[in-house]
Image (cartoon, helix red, strand yellow):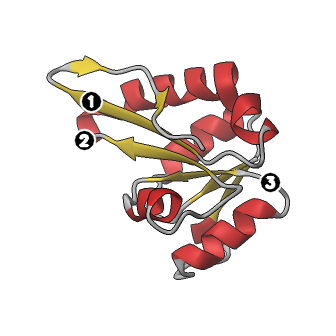
Amino acid sequence: MILADENIDTYIVSVLRSNNIKVFHISEGNRGVSDEEVIRLSKDPPGIILTEDKDFGEWVYSHKERDISVILLRYSFMETESIVSILLDLIESRGNELLTSVSDKKYFSAQRSNHAFHAPINIGAT
């Protein structure tokens, strides 16, 4: 399951759902909840946090929050279609990996830099 933070565009959520990916969008029922609450919601049942909020990286690294998976999106509006394509590829190819090792911290990033899209990579695990 994907737990889409409230900053995730509804278009991205609808594309994921149209590709048969189960998505709970925070803005559809829990608008305004804290990052701590989003993390709690992502643990039961286990889910992947999808966000544009870099603070979740701090939760993974600085606060040493365990048992969470985060996909951080960084893009401009004009890059939405490309970032959605990268996201779908990531979920299809590595979605199970994000959830299977619950003792590992996982943080993936999908971003655009220097006009080239970088493949999402695991940038941190314990």
**Looking at the picture, which amino acid does disc 3 mark?**
Pro
Left or right: 21 with respect to 82? right
Give how far across and how far down residue 37 sits, in percent.
Answer: 64, 77
**Is disc 3 surrounded by few (<14), some (14 to 19) or many (20+) residues within 10 Å?**
some
Labels 1 & 2 near each other (Cβ < 8 A)? yes
Q: Which residue is disc 1 drawn over?
A: 112
Q: Nearer the viewer, mark 3 or mark 2?
A: 3
User: Looking at this view, is 125 or 35 the one in front?
Assistant: 125
Mark 1 lies on a secondary structure that is strand
The tag earlier along the polypeptide, 1 or 3, is 3
User: Looking at this view, is 114 or 22 the one in front?
Assistant: 114
- In this rendering, the count of numbered labels is 3
Mark 3 lies on a secondary structure that is loop
Using the rendered view, name the quadrant where residue 104 is placed.
top right
Marks 3/2: CA distance?
29 Å
Labels 1 & 3 near each other (Cβ < 8 A)? no
Q: Which residue is disc 2 drawn over?
A: 76
**Is disc 2 surrounded by few (<14), some (14 to 19) or many (20+) residues within 10 Å?**
few
